[in-house]
Structures are given as structure tokens and as C-alpha cells.
Amino acid sequence: MKTLVTKISTSLAILSLFIIFTMITSCKKDKVTHGTVTVKNVVGVAVSGAKVVLSATSVGGVKSYTGTSDASGVAKFDVPLPGIWDVAVTKDTLTGQGVLRLDEPGKKDEITIVLR
């Protein structure tokens, strides 16, 4: 009888630890998508100070995020909404376009846009 009680207690303890571990690790999932846009000119030189806009149509209308490329020509976005984002880049009279696929939570994607 003691061995049956011991086996049941051990099984319940292992099951409890498994449930706790699963709950802890599931809470740490990255729910944000991460996009990187690199802006270059036609000769491949990084362009700083370019306006970078991500936009996508959602249930509530068009959602957009705006950033500026840094000295390395990079603009980074941490977007809480997964989606396929249209990318529009402008600097003075130069423009460029592309698509950034951030279609699932935790996903990272990057694109290089050439201004013309």
C-alpha cells in the first residue's frame, strides 16, 4: 500500500513540475515582431536620415510605424502587430519601396531598400 501511495505522490509531483515549467516558458514567448530596414543609394552606400514608414491595412484601418535610418543606414522596428508591411523610404527627392514580412509573433525579417 505504501508503494502505491509513493508512486502516486511521485507521479503528481512530476506532473506538477511539468505544468509549472510549461507555464513559465510559455510566458516568455516573444509576442513582438522585429524588422530591420537598411537604406542604401544606387552605389551601395548607406543613407542616414532617411524616413522609413511601415504600413499595413488592418481591421481598424491602416496602421503605420515611422522611423529614421541611422548613420549605418539602418532603421529598426519592434512591431506588436504581426503582418506583411509595405515599406516606403524617402530622403530628399529620392524614394524606395519594398515589403517586410513580419507575419508571426517573434519573427525577425530584414530588407534593403535602394533609393533612386
Image: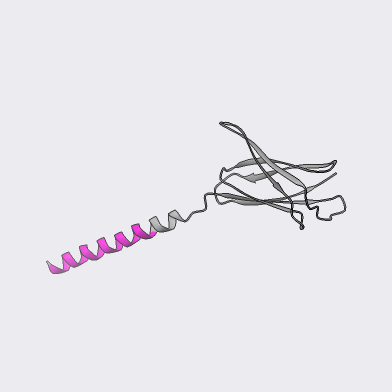
Res. 81 image quadrant = top right
Q: Give the quarter of the figure containing the C terminus.
A: top right
Q: Residue at x 21, y 64 (%)?
A: 9
| 88 vs 34: above or below | above
Q: What kind of colouring is applied to the model shown?
A: one colour
* Magenta-span inclusion, residue 5: yes
Locate residue 25 relative to residue 93 in the image: left or right: left
Using the image as rendered, state which of residue 102 and residue 9 is in the foreground. Answer: 102
- What x and y, as percent, mark residue 89? 76, 43
Q: Residue at x 32, y 62 (%)?
A: 17
Q: Residue at x 74, y 42 (%)?
A: 98
Locate residue 89 relative to residue 78 in the image: left or right: right
Q: Give the quarter of the figure containing the N terminus.
A: bottom left
Using the image as rendered, state which of residue 69 and residue 19 is in the foreground. Answer: 69
- What x and y, as percent, mark residue 26? 43, 54
Res. 46 image quadrant = bottom right
Q: Residue furthest right?
A: 43
| 27 vs 57: above or below | below
- What x and y, as percent, mark residue 83? 60, 41
* Magenta-span inclusion, residue 69: no
Most common secondary structure along the magenta stretch: helix
Q: Magenta stretch?
A: 2-21
Q: Residue at x 66, y 38 (%)?
A: 55
- What x and y, as percent, mark residue 88? 74, 41
